[in-house]
Image (cartoon, rainbow, N blue to C red):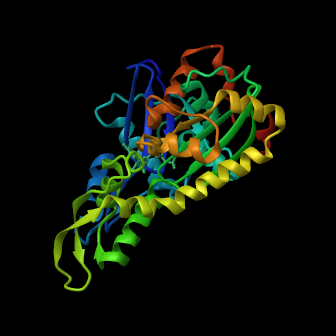
Amino acid sequence: MARNIYGLDLGSYEIKVYDKKKDTIWKEKDALALTDKKEIFAVGDEAYEMYEKTPPFLDVVFPMKQGVISRFTDMQFLLQNLLKKDRQFVRGSEYVIAVPTDVTEVEKKAFFDLVIHSNAKAKEVNIVERAIADAVGLNLDVQNTKGLFIANFGGETTELSVLAGGGMVLNRLLKTGGRTFDEAVINLIRHSHDFLIGRHTAENLRKSFGIFTSEVDEVIPAAGRDLITRVPMQKPISINLVRTAMKDPLLECIRAIQSLLDRTPPEVRKAIADNGIFLTGGVAHTAGLETYIEEMIGIRCRTALEPDICSVTGLKKIIESPELRKLAYSMIEENYRWMR
Ligand SMILES: Nc1ncnc2c1ncn2[C@@H]1O[C@H](COP(=O)(O)OP(=O)(O)OP(=O)(O)O)[C@@H](O)[C@H]1O
Ligand SMILES: [Mg+2]
C-alpha cells in the first residue's frame, strides 16, 4: 500500500489528524483508559467518557499535560491505536506535526521522537510551529505579513504569538486553558454551595451558555454530590456564578496578551492593530469571547471559522501546497543535528 501523509495537532484535550489519502480531518480525545495491569482498555473519546466513572481497576490517563507530552509511552500507544482504529493505517508514512514554540528543545523533540521511533516506522517527520499552522488555517499570508497576532485558546494552554515576515517575533505559552476554567467553576460551586460537580459537568456548564453574551441570569440544574449530606443530587446553578468563576483565568490571558503587545516592535504592532487579533483553539468557541477581548484590549478580534481544527487545517494546506511546504522543517537537519 502506498505511504500516506498525516498532519498531527496533538492537543492536551483532543488529538486532531489530517489523513491525506482519505482527505479527511478527524479528532479524538487525548485520553487512554488503562487496567491495573497497565493494559489498554479504551482509547480516545471512549476513554474520556469513562473519566470519573471508572471502576477501581481502571484508570483514565491524559498523556499530554499543558501542551507537552508528559507520558511518552502512553502517548505513543494512544496515537498508534487511534491511527489504526478502522482507518487503514499505513506504516512508513510521512508526518507533519504542529508543535508549541515556547517549550524546551527536549520537549519539542519529543513530538518528533513520538513517531520516528515508534512501530509506525515513520519515513519522514517534519514539524511546523503551531501559530504558523494556525495562520495558514486562517488563510493568512504568513510569508508577507507585516504583523499578525494569534491567540490559540486550548484545553490546557493558551498560546500567544506575534508573527511577521514569515517568522515568529514573540511567543508565550500560558498554562491556562479550558481545564483551568473548569477547575475554577468546580471550586466556586464547591465553596458557595457545598456541592461537588465533576469535570464533565463543569465543562458542559461552561460550554452550554453564551457566558459573555448576556447579563441576564438563569439557573440550570447540575448533577453532583452534596458535601454535607454526601448524597448525589441535582442542584440549580446560576450562570452568573459560572461567569464569575471564569473571570480570573480569563483576566490572566488578557494581561498576557497586553504584555506581549507592549513588547512588540511599533511597526509590527501597527500592522496588528490594522489586521486584528485572531482567535483559534476550542475555547474560542465560547460565545462573546471575541467581543470581551476586543473591549479589554482595544483591537478588533476575529475568531476562526472552526477554531478547534484551525491548526490541523493549516497542516492540511501545508501538506497539499509545495509553496507552503517550506514552512515545515525537519529536526534532523541544520541546527537540530546536534540533538541526535
Ligand atoms: N463550544 C465550546 N464552547 C466553549 N469551549 C469549548 C467548546 N468546544 C470546545 N471547547 C473547549 O475547548 C477546549 C479544547 O480546545 P482544543 O481542542 O483547542 O485544545 P487542545 O488543542 O487539545 O489543548 P492544548 O492546545 O491546550 O494542548 C476544551 O477545554 C473544551 O472544553
Ligand atoms: Mg491545541
**Residue pictured at 66% horizontal, 14% vertical:** 323
Name the quadrant of the C terminus: top right
Residue 71: x, y in percent? 50, 58
Looking at the picture, tell me which residue is in the foreground, 159 or 117: 159
Q: In the rendered view, tell whether residue 329 sits above or below residue 29.
A: above
Q: Is residue 95 left or right of residue 205?
A: right
Picture quadrant of residue 192: bottom left
Q: Is residue 113 visible?
A: yes
Q: Residue at x 54, y 26 (%)?
A: 137
Give the tally of numbered discs.
0
Question: Residue extending furthest top?
Answer: 322
Image quadrant where one finds the N terminus:
top left
Furthest residue toward front = 216
Q: Is residue 117 visible?
A: no
Q: Left of 232 or right of it: where is 25?
A: right
Residue 80 image position (x, y, % from top left):
41, 41
In front: 29, or 57? 29
Please say if 293 is above or below 189: above
Of residue 259 and residue 274, the one placed in the foreground of this image is 274
Quarter residue 33 falls in: bottom left
Residue at the (30%, 62%) spot, across then down: 238
Image x and y of residue 246, in percent: 46, 59
Q: Position of residue 92 (x, y in %)?
A: 50, 29
Name the residue located 43 percent from the left edge and 31 percent from the top edge: 306
Q: Residue 17 lies in what quarter of the image?
A: top left
100 shown above or below 332: below
